[in-house]
Amino acid sequence: MENKKAIFLDMDGTTLDDNKQMSEENLEALRLAAEAGHEVVITTGRTDSSAGYLRKRYGLDRIGCRYMIVYNGAAILDCETGKRLYSRTIPMEYTKAVIEAARREHLYLHTYAGDLVLTEREDENLAVYLKRTSMKARIVPDLMEAIEQPVHKLLAVAVREPDRLLAFQDSQAAWARGKVDMYFSCREYLEVVAEGVSKGDALLRFCRMMGIPAKQTIAAGDEGNDLSMIRAAGTGCAVANAQEEVKQVADYVTAHDNNHSAVAEIVKRFLL
């Protein structure tokens, strides 16, 4: 399809409202986009199991949403075949360094094992994360020892004192450069991924795999971890509730926020 386009959708704060619900207007607009032959790609910091849950819960699987970019771009999944089209994990030595640094700073940190959150601490940060994602956790005495294979990402959470995450990011910057990347998906979440992993990198990889020119892509987001894909897309969109730095790099800022079907506005303007 010569005019085929792809839309890359951040979920939390963009496609989903503040109550983690998707509006009927958003879903209908995405259905029409898929029906017209365009690719609808979930593009999230969530795990494959958590993103897959959203895909099925809101009926995105039924409207033709086949592919997902998860872990902020560390993996690209074909949901129909169950195959990972791309995967990039953090080297174990760097994972160990981040875990030890978080311990020294008494900062909550977790990773993932299958569909479970894996962490050493059962506290308010974990409780908030589990409520937001509908995931379950396994508490372990030593996170590094519990990790059986390299992970796609680590997540530091500080619900009550988010400024501690900024301090941690700054304190780790010197050794982390060229090894891991750290950026925010919201004020309370500091994402840690392998160096070079981003939603923007995954968007361009997906386009090369599918033969879709990057200029024929649309990306929609609201937070710091969406900056790379908004820059990489042919048309980068920030929803009205997006962080100011995201709006500054966007080609288009919606009139509506995530609580009022901003994604439907984007789809109608650029795809339908």
Image (cartoon, helix red, strand yellow):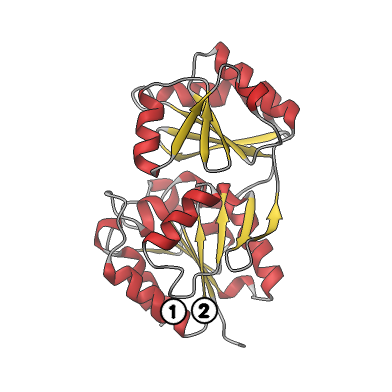
Label 2 SS: loop
- Coordinates of residue 124 in the picture (x, y in percent): 35, 24
- Looking at the image, the residue that sits furthest to the left is 260
Q: Contact (CB < 8 A) between labels 1 and 2?
A: yes
Location of residue 73 with respect to 106 vertically, above or below: below
Q: Name the residue rendered at 52%, 79% in the picture.
A: 38
Amino acid under disc 1: Ala
Label 1 SS: helix
- Coordinates of residue 5 in the picture (x, y in percent): 55, 77
User: Label 2 belongs to which residue?
Assistant: 38
User: Label 1 belongs to which residue?
Assistant: 33
Amino acid under disc 2: His
Q: CA distance from mark 1 to mark 2?
A: 6 Å
- Name the image quarter holding residue 142: top right
User: With 114 as the anchor, is 260 left or right in this view?
Assistant: left
The quadrant the C terminus occupies is bottom left
- Looking at the image, the residue that sits furthest to the bottom is 2
